[in-house]
C-alpha cells in the first residue's frame, strides 16, 4: 500500500517540524544565553511561517 501526501500536506509537516525547532532553539537560548546575542529561533520561525503560508495558499487556491 502506497502512502502519498499532497504537496500542501508536506509543507504543513515541514512547518510543524520548524515549529518544534523554533521552540527548542528559543528554550535553549533563553536558558543558556539570556539577553545575549542573536536568537536563531527567529530564523526557524520565519521559515515556519513561510512553510505554513505556502501550505495555506496551496490548500485554498481554488477558493481565492
Image (cartoon, helix red, strand yellow):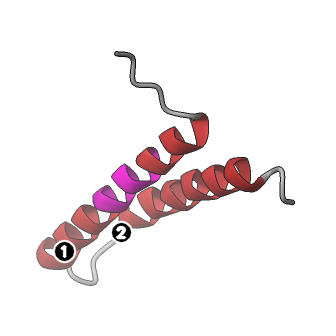
The C terminus: image quadrant: bottom right
Indicate whether residue 43 is drawn in magenta: no
Mark 1: secondary structure: loop
Indicate left or right for 63 with 41 as reference. Answer: right
The residue that mark 2 highlights is 39
What secondary structure prevails in the magenta region?
helix
Q: Quadrant of residue 3?
A: top left
Which numbered circle lies on residue 1? none
Image point 59% across, 43% down: which residue?
Answer: 8
Q: Secondary structure at mark 2?
A: loop
Q: Which residue is mark 1?
A: 33
Farthest residue, direction bottom: 35
- Of labels 2 and 1, earlier in sequence is 1
What span is in magenta? Answer: 14-21
Q: Residue at x 84, y 58 (%)?
A: 63
Q: Nearer the viewer, residue 15 or 29?
A: 15
Residue 11's x, y, as percent?
53, 44
For the N terminus, give its image quadrant: top left
Work out how far the residue at label 2 is from the one at label 1, CA to CA, in angstroms.
9 Å
Q: Residue placed farthest to the right in the image?
A: 64
Between residues 38 and 14, which one lies in front from this camera angle?
Answer: 14
Amino acid at each position: 500500500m502506497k502512502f502519498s501526501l499532497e504537496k500542501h500536506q508536506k509543507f504543513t509537516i515541514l512547518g510543524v517540524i520548524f515549529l518544534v525547532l523554533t521552540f527548542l532553539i528559543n528554550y535553549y537560548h533563553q536558558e543558556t544565553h539570556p539577553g545575549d546575542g542573536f536568537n536563531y529561533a527567529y530564523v526557524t520561525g520565519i521559515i515556519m511561517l513561510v512553510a505554513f503560508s505556502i501550505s495555506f495558499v496551496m490548500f485554498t487556491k481554488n477558493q481565492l
